[in-house]
Amino acid sequence: MNRFFSTILLATFTMVFVASCNSEKKENKHPNQFTVDGEIKGLTGDLYFRHPDKEYTRETPPDTLKFINGKIHFSDTISKLTLIRAYPSFTGPDNKLFKIPKGGRGMFPVKCGYLMFYAFPGAKITIQGEATDFMNAYPSGDQFNNSLAAANKLTFPNYNKMGNLAVQNTYETDSIKMKENDVISEEIFKKNTEDLIAHIKANPNSLGGAWYLNDMLLRRQIDDDKAEELFTNLSKDLSEYEDYKNVASRIEGTKSTKEGFPVPSIKTTATLDGKEFDINSLRGKYVLIDFWGIWCGPCVAEMPQVKEFQEKHKEKLVVLGINSGDSKEKIDEFVKKHDYTWRQLMSDKANTSDNFVNRFNVQGFPTKFIIDPRGNIVKKYLGGGEDAFKLLEELLNK
């Protein structure tokens, strides 16, 4: 074989080898990778989210969904199927998606201001829609995102109307007009709830429906019996997913936290010192369970009174704090600073057995439970603790 043909063969082999390597490189994706592609017309900035596989502190910046002229091509990895809620900059050009009331103090973080989608290993998610005064953009590409989009398309326009009316009332000076807006908003809310319930009932395989059912329970927008009926109708094919498990846990919580019932079992190492805690160890004394968060103003405001009760009745009363939403380090620093010496547990959204917020069907903060010395629930209080303190005083002074 002459040198000319040898050179040609070598060049051909090299090209085939390089092409083969490039092909393998393209196909050798991380098994947990997901992608997000699409366009949100009218979106002029980026969106931000908290990655479920990462730990964040107050100083940790969120992850970014980068949009260029409203278009996105994004990829990342994720360990399991999780709902992502991405939001625009609160102060940037897209803050119109969050309703800003008169005076600019705070905002109405309505659901329709978020881009919502399910991410999971192997997901190829397509986003399409527009950003007007709400996030009229929805995911598709698989059964999970299709189900979420169907529910969001039903609810988002209604949430937007209610949010706009709420903002209008912060500027409105005519009391009659304000009442008219309230009536209109209440009618929209009622119709939206009825339509959403019908949607969940008609779509038992919808994971998005399961998420909305849990959300309605959390916000007390549905009575316990109706919620249980809808949950029973959900397909058991969803039972491996967190959104289904969250509803199941909260439904069980509605039944197991009734007055006179034994307090739900708590045996956990979700403590500040990492040592195991068993609520049965508190038998023989009254127990005040206080669901709280450092982010919750009313919770923090009541804690000096909780401390006063603990010290005054230490022979008969044990206080158990259950924090939701704060890091272990932040809780530890806070309780030491204020000398709050009672035991603290940490509710964990990612762990069904340690998701005490769901297991006790906590629907707002603060929430307090009074447990008698036999371990039975005496009373549950949502909101301010004045009534709880009054009842405790009566019980402890018998």
Image (spheres, helix red, strand yellow):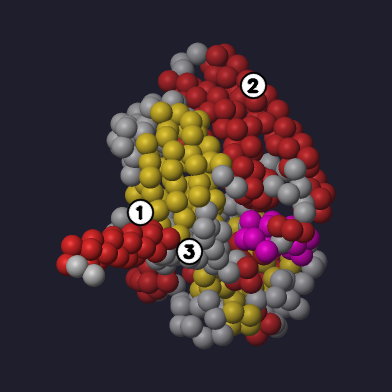
Q: CA distance from mark 3 to mark 2?
A: 48 Å
Q: In the rendered image, which quarter contains the N terminus?
A: bottom left
Residue furthest left as drawn:
3
Residues under numbered marks 3 and 1 in contact, where contact means CB atoms less than 8 Å apart = no
Q: Which residue is mark 2?
A: 183
- Image location (x, y in percent) of residue 86: 44, 45
- As helix, strand or loop, the secondary structure at mark 3 comes to loop
Mark 1 or mark 2: whose residue is earlier in sequence: 1
Q: Residues within 10 Å of mark 1 (few under 14, many from 20)?
A: few
**Residue at (58% x, 69% y) in the render:** 351
Q: Which residue is mark 3?
A: 32
- As helix, strand or loop, the secondary structure at mark 2 comes to helix
Q: Is residue 170 above or below residue 121?
A: above
- Residue 63's disc is 1
- Residue 347's disc is none
Mark 3 or mark 1: whose residue is earlier in sequence: 3
Q: Amino acid at mark 2?
A: Val
Closer to viewer: mark 1 or mark 2: 1
**Secondary structure, magenta segment, majority class:** helix
Q: Amino acid at mark 3?
A: Asn
* Magenta stretch contains residue 254: yes
Residue closer to the observer: 75 or 54: 75
Residue closer to the observer: 155 or 318: 155
- Image location (x, y in percent) of residue 386: 59, 55
Q: CA distance from mark 3 to mark 1?
A: 17 Å
Mark 3 or mark 2: whose residue is earlier in sequence: 3
Q: Which stretch appears magenta?
A: 240-257
